Amino acid sequence: MSDPKKIHIEDVYKVYDGRAVLDNVDLCVSAGEFCALVGPSGCGKSTLLRLILGQEQPSRGSVLIEGQAAGFPDPRRGIVFQRYSLYPHLTVLDNVLLGRRLAQPWSWLPWSKPRPDDRDEAMDLLERVRLGDAAAKFPHELSGGMQQRVAIAQALIMKPPVLLMDEPFGALDPDTREDLQVFLLELWERERLTMFFVTHDLEEACFLGTRLLVLSQYYTDARGADAPRGGKIVADYRLSPTGTATAVKRRDEFKNFIHELRETGFDPAIRRHVKDFDLEHPDSFQTLTAEEYRRDGEKSAGNP
Ligand SMILES: Nc1ncnc2c1ncn2[C@@H]1O[C@H](COP(=O)(O)OP(=O)(O)OP(=O)(O)O)[C@@H](O)[C@H]1O
Ligand SMILES: [Mg+2]
């Protein structure tokens, strides 16, 4: 029976060179959710995305897409990276057509031409990302924001129900970034995509996501404070939709929420003392009490 959950990650570990990078990750994502994934550098965000993409396989546990093993990359998922997804020697149109052409037999023959239907669809997509006029240009002739819109069209042409994005706006200036955030929300609403969006920008995560996932390697559990451990999901917030007006970011409510998040989850001094997150209570971090904090400190001092 097919699993109604779009993505089901169960008990996943990923080990590189004998070191756990992901440490018991459990996650269920429904169709149409916009998951914004944040967390300290090196906690395994990109690794988790690669597991969902099928570019990497879990060392233990399972990654299911609608009940089927994630396996290897296929059109069920598309991905957009921070940069470098475009081929510099191909025009914008040919870059968008690439996935379709590679799926055709004989696509490697130099005289093979795109099918007219594919071409129309690619042009239609370029119109949707507001780049209809740039079809014949080469990537170096476009701004960073335009290139990222081409990369989004390139991923969308295979009609993936799940779109994975790894810091896609990280290299853009603030205005372009804001513009693309609104663009992405509109696209997500229209195409009913299930999104996985990695960012280092908490504001961006809270603005875009219907769900905020915090992956972190900084948590304490029965293994003791200094045991090596990989990243796991330490917080899972449901966010109410903010709408697509970026003005919402300037509201006090929004600013206060961001401030609270930073205080509780991201201050390094505090996050080292975050207790194992209890998934029964997905709305809060469970920080140590002052007494537990003191005892923890004494323990560490006694066992250097
Ligand atoms: N192919 C690999 N071989 C060995 N180690 C790897 C490999 N890929 C990732 N790692 C290690 O796994 C850890 C997590 O890497 P990952 O790129 O997933 O982190 P991240 O959360 O995306 O970090 P950042 O925010 O800096 O992008 C890092 O310590 C990294 O060095
Ligand atoms: Mg990364």
Image (cartoon, rainbow, N blue to C red):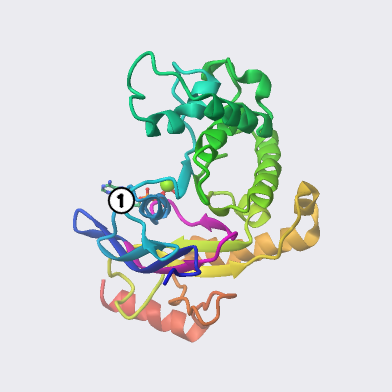
What is the magenta segment's predominant secondary structure? strand
Report which residue position mark 1 lands on: 56
Looking at the rendering, the stretch of residues picked out in magenta corresponds to 22-42
In this picture, residue 298 sits left or right of residue 237: left
Tag 1: amino acid: Glu
Q: Where is residue 149 in the image (x, y as percent from the top left)?
A: 60, 33
Q: Give the position of the C terminus as an image quadrant.
A: bottom left
Residue 125 visible in the snapshot: yes
Q: Relative to residue 294, is residue 251 depicted above or below? A: above
Nearest to the observer: residue 101 or residue 256: 101
Secondary element under disc 1, as helix, strand or loop, is loop
Residue for point 45% across, 48% down: 77
Nearest to the observer: residue 52 or residue 204: 52
Nearest to the observer: residue 58 or residue 2: 2
Q: Quadrant of residue 92?
A: top right
Q: Relative to residue 69, is residue 143 depicted above or below? A: above
Q: Does the residue labelled 1 lie within 8 Å of ligand 1?
A: yes
Q: Give the position of the N terminus as an image quadrant.
A: bottom left
Residue for point 33% across, 47% down: 55
Total numbered circles: 1
Q: Is residue 255 magenta?
A: no
Q: In which quarter of the image is residue 58?
A: bottom left
Q: Relative to residue 243, is residue 132 depicted above or below? A: above
